[in-house]
């Protein structure tokens, strides 16, 4: 954007004084604030010569002008969309070149939300979610917005895979949440369980929305936005006082490269609130961009790898010819339809989708829905379909060890000693299970007598602390439910072993471990060993032991024993019962499984909840 000056000074970025004119009907502004100006768009690289009004920051209420204190006027892109962003609640899609100030559009939308909430309630009644594909971008925006919106009472919180804060606690106290598609997907996959938090989202900002076209991550962004649209519709149906769904949740999406902004706007809109789309080209680009399109045919006998290799050899010569010593961006486009068809055929081969020959009729199978629900990798689901016959606990451990979700786990420096020690004693009785992959121990091991944790994919004893039970990785839960729905030989035994393995991994203890006290917060490996040596190997025995005796066993001072017993008393206690009855229609015996709370007192028969009927 050309540099603008106060009235009375000559702006050096323009050739003639007539290039800048006050608008015909000036907007009332406060004393000392620059007036809006009209400029020739030809003053920008690639401009068309059309006159464009630059809107003044003075249009923003005085309270919020501090957010835009770095400039006196909004640039061309921001001025064109200002009315739609600041004076309406309609969803909006903006496509504008890189560096054209799209972030300010997000800030205008936040100011609009604050203005709207001033009339309806305090700031705590609404939340803003900013979603970007790169963690570094979330961190940069969090620091920037904390400085800008912090003085206005807004708390910005970053929630990505690198943050260590408690997710739902951070959501409760935050006003602006900055996250990635994958993280928000994992947090909202079961959004009905956290309805009180999710329904507070009033503004959903999507940066780099062209990620929808990404082969590996596009599906996640599409799922997240679609889920938030479902949230908007569900909350709107439940709220009798809501007059418009747009007033409940507003979408703002920006990108520099989307060719079909109108289609995305139609997708983000709703029946009662259509979305607005803006598409601005090279005429508003701050730095002129020169494009060259080159085509290279692929020889029919060549493989895809050989064709890519041939392009690599051409790359240096092309850059030297066209770059003129300036920064250069090289993009390679492939036939999107061929890629889509290849992916669909792979999904159909693994029975994850049903489709006809032309792929016009698509329908997700039960396995496909499990894959989406538990966020299971495609390679993992493909391996699940190879389950045949009777599977024991060790077989399932081996299957989990080969899951795609654990391929990227690397051995840490402080973990080598423990793993090497186990590799040198692979025949010892203390090893529960050894998995050899690519001539090396993959690390599914466990001590039977002195088992401190369940070891998976490189986690051995308590020294290896890499998390295998991360909420984002639910491949085992998906496998358990998958086995429940698959008719196979001895399915009940396989399902039973899968449930045991799932339980063991979540508790970091095998099902027959005596170190159950390790699940308590203040009990570590040493104290757990003391309890086992004293014969205290269950929660029932802990409850029946005097607190002072517990303190003597673990060599701790009061009130440590009382704290441990109180922690055990707070654990939920349930009783499971199975009844066999005859079906009234067919006369076939069926099993009815009931669950009841054994802590309920003073009633003749506790309330029983039917879990399943087989």
Image (tube, helix red, strand yellow):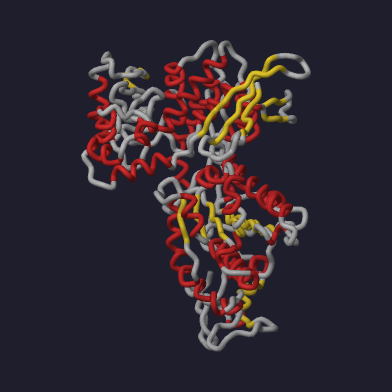
Q: How many marks can you see?
A: 0
Does residue 564 appear anywhere in the picture? Answer: yes
Does residue 41 appear anywhere in the picture? Answer: no
Q: Is residue 119 left or right of residue 500?
A: right
Residue 473 drawn at (x, y percent): 48, 35
Q: Which residue is depicted at the point 68% across and 64% down?
A: 89
Q: Which residue is depicted at the point 55% across and 34% down?
A: 374
Image vertical order of residue 497 relative to residue 91, above or below: above
Q: Which residue is depicted at the point 59% across and 56% down?
A: 204
Q: Nearer the viewer, residue 85 or 16?
A: 85
Image vertical order of residue 204 relative to residue 60, above or below: above
Q: Which residue is depicted at the point 60% across and 24% down?
A: 346
Image vertical order of residue 385 relative to residue 225, above or below: above
Q: Nearer the viewer, residue 178 or 608?
A: 608
In which quadrant of the rendered view does residue 525 lie? top left
Residue 142 drawn at (x, y percent): 45, 59
Q: Is residue 589 left or right of residue 65?
A: right
In which quadrant of the rendered view does residue 485 lie? top right
Residue 222 drawn at (x, y percent): 61, 43
Q: Nearer the viewer, residue 364 or 499?
A: 499
Q: Quadrant of the C terminus?
A: top right
Q: Nearer the viewer, residue 352 or 15?
A: 352
């Amino acid at each position: 954007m050309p540099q603008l000056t106060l009235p009375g000074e000559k702006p050096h970025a323009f050739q003639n004084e007539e290039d800048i004119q006050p608008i015909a009907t000036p907007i009332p502004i406060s004393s000392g604030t620059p007036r809006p100006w009209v400029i020739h768009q030809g003053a920008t690289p690639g401009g068309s010569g059309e006159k464009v009004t630059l809107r003044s920051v003075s249009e923003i209420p005085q309270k919020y002008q501090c957010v835009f204190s770095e400039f006196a006027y909004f640039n061309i892109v921001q001025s064109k969309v200002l009315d739609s962003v600041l004076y309406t609640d309609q969803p909006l899609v903006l496509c504008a070149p890189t560096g054209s100030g799209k972030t300010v559009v997000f800030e205008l939308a936040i100011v609009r939300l604050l203005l709207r909430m001033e009339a309806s309630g305090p700031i705590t009644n609404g939340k803003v979610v900013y979603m970007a594909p790169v963690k570094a971008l979330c961190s940069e925006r969090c620091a920037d917005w904390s400085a800008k919106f912090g003085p206005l009472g807004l708390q910005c919180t970053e929630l990505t895979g690198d943050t260590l804060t408690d997710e739902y606690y951070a959501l409760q106290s935050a006003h602006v949440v900055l996250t990635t598609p994958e993280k928000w997907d994992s947090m909202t996959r079961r959004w009905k369980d956290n309805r009180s938090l999710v329904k507070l989202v009033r503004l959903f900002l999507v940066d780099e929305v062209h990620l929808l076209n990404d082969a590996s991550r596009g599906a996640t962004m599409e799922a997240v936005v679609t889920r938030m649209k479902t949230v908007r519709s569900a909350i709107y149906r439940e709220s009798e006082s809501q007059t418009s769904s747009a007033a409940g949740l507003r979408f703002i999406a920006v990108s520099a490269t989307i060719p079909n902004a109108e289609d995305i706007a139609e997708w983000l809109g709703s029946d009662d609130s259509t979305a607005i789309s803006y598409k601005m080209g090279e005429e508003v680009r701050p730095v002129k961009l020169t494009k060259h399109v080159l085509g290279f045919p692929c020889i029919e006998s060549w493989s895809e790898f050989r064709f890519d290799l041939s392009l690599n050899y051409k790359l240096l010569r092309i850059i030297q010819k066209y770059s003129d010593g300036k920064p250069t961006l090289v993009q390679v486009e492939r036939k999107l339809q061929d890629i889509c068809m290849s992916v669909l055929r792979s999904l159909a081969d693994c029975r994850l989708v049903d489709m006809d020959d032309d792929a016009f009729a698509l329908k997700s199978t039960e396995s496909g829905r499990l894959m989406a629900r538990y966020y299971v990798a495609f390679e993992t689901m493909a391996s699940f379909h190879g389950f045949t016959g009777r599977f024991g606990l060790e077989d399932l451990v081996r299957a989990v060890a080969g899951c795609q979700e654990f391929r990227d786990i690397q051995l840490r420096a402080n973990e080598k000693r423990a793993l090497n020690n186990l590799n040198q004693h692979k025949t010892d009785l203390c090893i529960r299970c050894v998995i050899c992959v690519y001539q090396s121990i993959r690390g599914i091991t466990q001590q039977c007598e002195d088992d401190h944790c369940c070891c998976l994919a490189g986690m051995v004893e308590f020294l290896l602390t890499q998390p295998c039970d991360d909420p984002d990785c639910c491949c085992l839960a998906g496998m358990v439910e998958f086995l429940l729905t698959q008719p196979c030989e001895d399915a009940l035994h396989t399902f039973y072993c899968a449930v045991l393995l799932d339980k063991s991994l979540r508790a970091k203890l095998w099902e027959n471990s005596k170190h159950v006290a390790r699940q308590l917060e203040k009990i570590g490996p040493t104290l757990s060993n003391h309890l086992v040596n004293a014969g205290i190997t269950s929660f029932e025995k802990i409850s029946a032991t005097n607190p002072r005796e517990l303190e003597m066993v673990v060599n701790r001072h009061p009130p440590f024993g009382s704290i441990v017993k109180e922690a055990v008393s707070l654990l939920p206690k349930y009783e499971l019962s199975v009844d066999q009855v005859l079906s009234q229609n067919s006369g076939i015996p069926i099993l009815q499984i009931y669950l009841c709370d054994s802590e309920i007192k003073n009633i003749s028969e506790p309330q029983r909840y039917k879990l399943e009927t087989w």
